[in-house]
Amino acid sequence: MQLRLQELQRQLQASGLARELKREKQRLETCQETVRARMQEREELRRQIASLERACQDLAARKKQLEGKLYSGETSNPKELNNIQHKIDTTAGELAREEERAMELALQQEQLEEWLKENVSKLQAGKAAYREKLDQYRTWREGLQQEMDVLAVNAARLEGEIDSKLLALYSDLQRRLGTKVLARVVKGTCSGCHLVVPPVLLREARAGKFIYCESCGRLLLP
């Protein structure tokens, strides 16, 4: 019973799944932050594009107004006509630059939308896989813990039936070695340190004597 309890504790402590889940959670959180930042970037692009579109509309309206004034025949003064034409050319240049900038930002937005579509999908799939792994780990851990709890209850019940000297011996071993105080002899070797157990000690253990591993000090169970 105690060996099984030790084995369950070892499995719980040695499991790499918890560390793997922690790393995966950190990776997903990093991806989430990246996606969130790109979404904010998208909103900023939308704001800039909308602002440029309004500016283009204003410039186009101003250009049309100036052209109307130029060709209305209201003035025949060459200097004034040249001044209006200069304003039209300047406005047209500003309009062309703003339209070009708006097109560049629209292209950036399109590329960003494609990136978001792909990476949001990956993030959602990653979260789903993480939740599934987490559920599996929790189920496994809870099952392990339940079995450990049952073993602990049974061990406590049996303590009253065990010889006080043996119980004191076991407690002393626990103080010195921790939880792993028992070791089976498997194919002539100690399962605790994996070193060979001398045949004479193995015979004594099989005879019912309390025999300790000469290497790690654990109580040997034949």
Image (cartoon, rainbow, N blue to C red):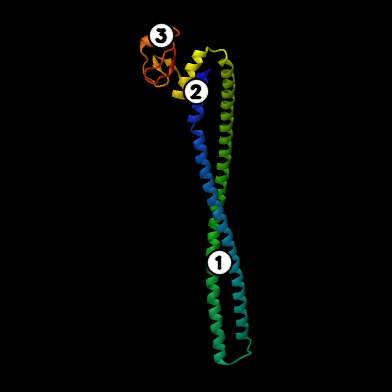
Q: Nearer the viewer, residue 49 or 194?
A: 194
Q: Which residue is mark 2?
A: 7
Label 3 environment density (alpha carbons within 10 Å; few <14, some 14–19, many ≥20): few
Q: Position of residue 90 (x, y in %)?
A: 53, 79
Which residue shows up at 63% across the image and 81% down it? Answer: 65
Spatial CA span between label 3 and label 1: 90 Å
Which residue shows up at 63% across the image and 86% down it? Answer: 72
Spatial CA span between label 3 and label 2: 25 Å
Label 1 environment density (alpha carbons within 10 Å; few <14, some 14–19, many ≥20): many
Tell which circle, 3 or 2, labels the residue nearer the N-terminal end. Answer: 2
Say left or right for 102 vs 222: right
Number of numbered callouts drawn = 3
Q: Position of residue 84 (x, y in %)?
A: 57, 85
Q: Position of residue 32 (x, y in %)?
A: 55, 48
Q: Residue furthest top?
A: 207
Name the kind of residue labelled 1 in the image: Ala
Which residue shows up at 48% across the image and 18% down it? Answer: 170
Q: Is residue 207 above or below residue 214?
A: above
User: Marks 3 and 2: which is nearer the front?
Assistant: 3
Q: Which mark is residue 102?
A: 1
Secondary structure at numbered mark 1 = helix
Name the kind of residue labelled 2 in the image: Glu
Q: Position of residue 45 (x, y in %)?
A: 56, 62
Spatial CA span between label 1 and label 2: 66 Å
Secondary structure at numbered mark 3 = helix
Q: Which residue is mark 3?
A: 204
Residue 110 sits in quarter: bottom right
**Marks 3 & 2, CB-CB < 8 Å contact:** no
| Residue 118 shows in the view | no
Name the kind of residue labelled 3 in the image: Glu
Which quadrant of the figure contains the C terminus? top left
